[in-house]
Amino acid sequence: MQKMTFEEKLKRCPPAEVWQEYCGFLSLSLPEYMDIQKRLLMEQVQLMSGCALGQRFFKGNTPSTVEEFRARVPLTRFEDYADVLLPQREDMLPAKPVVWLHTTWEGGDFPSKRAPYTESMLETYKTNILAAMLLSTSRGPGHFHVRPGCRVLYSLAPMPYATGMFPDLISSEIHLRFMPSVREARKMSFGQQMRTGYKQAAKYGMNLFFGMSSVLYGATRSLNMLGGEKSYSLKSLLGMSPRMLYRILAAKYRSRRDGAALKPRDLFKLDGFVCVGTDTALYKNELEEAWGIRPLEIAGGTEPSCMGTETWSKNGLVFFPDACFYEFIPERELYQEMENPGYVPHTYLMDELVAGQKYELVITVLKGGAFLRYRVGDVYRCLRLRNPADALNLPQFEYVDRIPTVIDIAGFTRITRREIETVLSRSRLPVADWLAVKEYDEAGHSYLDLYIELKTEDEQAALLDCQMLQELLSVYFRSYDGDYKDLKRLLGMDPLRITLLKTGTMERYRARTGRRVPPVGAPREVVLDLLRLQAGEEGGAV
């Protein structure tokens, strides 16, 4: 008997049955969840035991329990896989990939990371994306509003990025009218795809919205894209559907009558709104105010695929039990590792977490994936261990940031020590010392704050104009890192800020404290100590 598609299930099956199939994991107890995790992990261990990549980590001694796996297999990073995955050595993998996905490694001269996806991984990815679609339209357990044939504005990165798989995977399960069509979108740049999609949405309306949070925020603020006073000529108005024409004319009338700015929610009535991106939490409130519906956040990436989703309450992520096996490194262990590079941090499982604590995520990709105990580089906070209001007995999380040694800006670029050193070297500025931290402006949006000491006081006196320094270094960042360049091109933002420190400030800090200053991701108290030290030597209070 042929398996029913998602669309056929929506038409033929009771809603409760559809909900149970795709969102039933939300009713699991934590012991039930852990049983699934451990069973799938041991299945993955057996797959890895039969391939060269797995034996690289097992060293001829395949673990027979979860405890042995965690004790014997080291924590890994992409460097441990690069010689196999960059040349796409399928002969060394546990299962044959159907597709290879790419993403940024560290920008600049480094090649992109690559991740293989097996058929089983794609099936899991598809099921979990459909679950997120149901939840994005849900107001409670078992209630959802997903309609075949609905119009979907799609503003996510195309293939070979992970989000680019979504249209192809969904097309075999349900008919959706993407704007622009998948065929059109693949002939366009990301920026062209966005502009065309918004124009089509304004013309015909839309029901679902999938997008990258920072991109959606930038587009939302652009009234010329989303319904500003000068957006529509008579010709464009005549080409609209009657429903959209009525909404636009009525919204413009109310806007003039009330003296209120026109917002997307005045034009569109969304059934569901799905956001992805590392800075989603910073934009969600503004997006909800603009669009009239709170975005549902999903978590994932190139290596873990679609890994987690919020529930109907949209107040915390739940990780899917069948995408990856999850381990967690506490924040205190991360800082201990930064101070002692040879230190091996301890990991905890989902049923060993503490509410309110921050953790670096460690994943083992299931269903034939290539990554074992892999440090993705993302930090999550465990919000709560259970949610009685939603009858949820699983931990919920919020994305916090990248690990301290990686500065992520708006989900577009990942800036590391190596990248900053290269940019400063190419600029030929007389830099003696520096440190970089991620900061937030008054609106809560992130930027890179680069603290610089020049080699001599005379050179510092000649370059006291921070704005000039900022513009100069921005040119070098954009020329070196294409993702950084996209921030300016797509979002209209330059995330760099320069703070000049008096020559010798960092050396005096090291002499006074006996501690070195981490060049990237220094704790906030270190930055404040440096500023107090400088202020004190200039006559301020220490």
Image (spheres, rainbow, N blue to C red):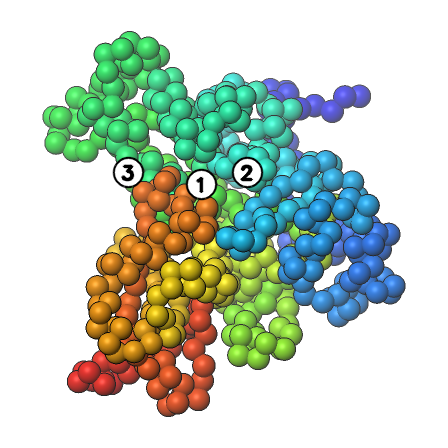
Circle 1: residue type: Met
* Mark 3 nearby-residue class (10 Å; few <14, some 14–19, many ≥20): some
Q: Where is residue 408 in the image (x, y as percent from the top left)?
A: 45, 55
Seen at 70% across and 23% down, the residue is 4
Q: Position of residue 449 (x, y in %)?
A: 34, 63
Q: Quadrant of the C terminus?
A: bottom left
Does residue 519 appear to the left or right of 464 in the view shown?
A: right
* Mark 2 nearby-residue class (10 Å; few <14, some 14–19, many ≥20): many
Q: Position of residue 132 (x, y in %)?
A: 54, 38
Seen at 26% across and 29% down, the residue is 224
Q: In which quarter of the image is residue 208?
A: top left
Q: Distance between the residues labelled 1 and 2?
A: 10 Å
Q: State which tag comes first along the sequence, 1 or 2.
A: 2
Q: Do the residues labelled 1 and 2 touch (CB within 8 Å)?
A: yes
Query: Helix or strand or loop: what does disc 2 sit on?
Result: helix
Circle 2: residue type: Thr
- Which residue carries the number 3 mark? 221
Query: Helix or strand or loop: what does disc 1 sit on?
Result: strand
Q: Distance between the residues labelled 1 and 3?
A: 14 Å
Do we see residue 424 in this rendering? yes
Q: Is residue 203 above or below residue 28?
A: above
* Mark 1 nearby-residue class (10 Å; few <14, some 14–19, many ≥20): many
Q: How far apart are marks 2 and 3 (CA)?
A: 23 Å
Circle 3: residue type: Arg
Does residue 255 appear to the left or right of 513 in the view shown?
A: left
- Which residue carries the number 1 mark? 212
Q: Is residue 30 above or below residue 26?
A: below
Does residue 419 appear to the left or right of 321 in the view shown?
A: left
Residue 163: which disc? Answer: 2
Q: Position of residue 265 (x, y in %)?
A: 30, 31
Seen at 64% across and 57% down, the residue is 78
Q: Are marks 1 and 3 in contact (CB under 8 Å)?
A: no
